Image (cartoon, rainbow, N blue to C red):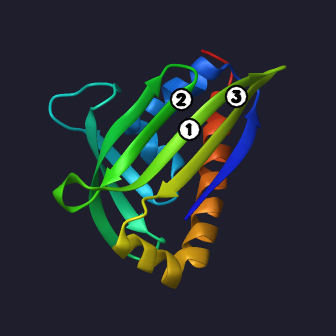
Amino acid sequence: MQDSVTVRMTAPAERIWELVSDIRNTGKFSPETFEAEWLGGATGPAVGVKFRGHVNRNGWGLKYWTVCRIVACDPGREFAFTVLGPGNTPVNTWTYRFTPVDGGTDVTESFRLEQSFPLRIYSLIAGRSRTRTNVNGMRETLERIKAVAEQPAP
């Protein structure tokens, strides 16, 4: 299970990257993850840093925390994190790529579910529905980021 969505924003890649990589902004942008906090004394993004996200799955009331680890942190270019399952096993990786274009930045958000046996079964059962939900959520997330990123600087 994997997919991606790209939205063009009339803002510099560095500005958008700063919004995305500060996970405390997650609740402003994501339709499912409504808050996030740094863990282990971290105060900002770096490869290996962990954070916790509070999720309202599918918007129908199943609320839980997930621990995530940052796996890519290249200012203005890429930000990615892996959602960790039991035993710190990677479950799902979310990636944001920032591509400068004339007049702005193409921002691509993607997800990729790991290929363990239990997750393959999950993909068979709920793959199409969950992928559709994720694609819609990524589009909504990127449009919310765009609305903030394109505001004039104070």
In the visual, does 150 lie left or right of 49? right
Query: Is 62 rendered above or below residue 136?
Result: below
Mark 2 nearby-residue class (10 Å; few <14, some 14–19, many ≥20): many
Contact? badges 1 and 3 (CB < 8 Å): no
Q: Nearer the viewer, mark 1 or mark 3?
A: 1
Q: Tell whether 69 sits left or right of 7.
A: left
Alpha-carbon span between mark 1 and mark 2: 6 Å
The x, y position of residue 75, in whole percent, is 50, 19
Q: Amino acid at mark 1?
A: Tyr
Dot 3: what SS? loop
Looking at the rendered image, the quarter that the N terminus falls into is bottom right
Indicate the quadrant where residue 86 lies.
bottom left
Inter-mark Cα distance, 2 to 3: 19 Å
Q: Depth check: give the residue in front, 129 or 150.
A: 129
Quarter of the figure that contains the C terminus: top right
Residue pointed to by mark 1: 96
**Pointer 2: what residue?**
78
Question: SS class of the residue under badge 2?
Answer: strand
| Residue 51, x across and y down, in percent | 27, 41
Residue positioned 42% across, 59% down in the render: 114
The mark that comes first in sequence, 1 or 3, is: 1
Disc 3 marks which residue? 150
**Mark 1, other Cα within 10 Å: few <14 / some 14–19 / many ≥20:** many
Could you tell me residue 94's position as x and y percent?
48, 47
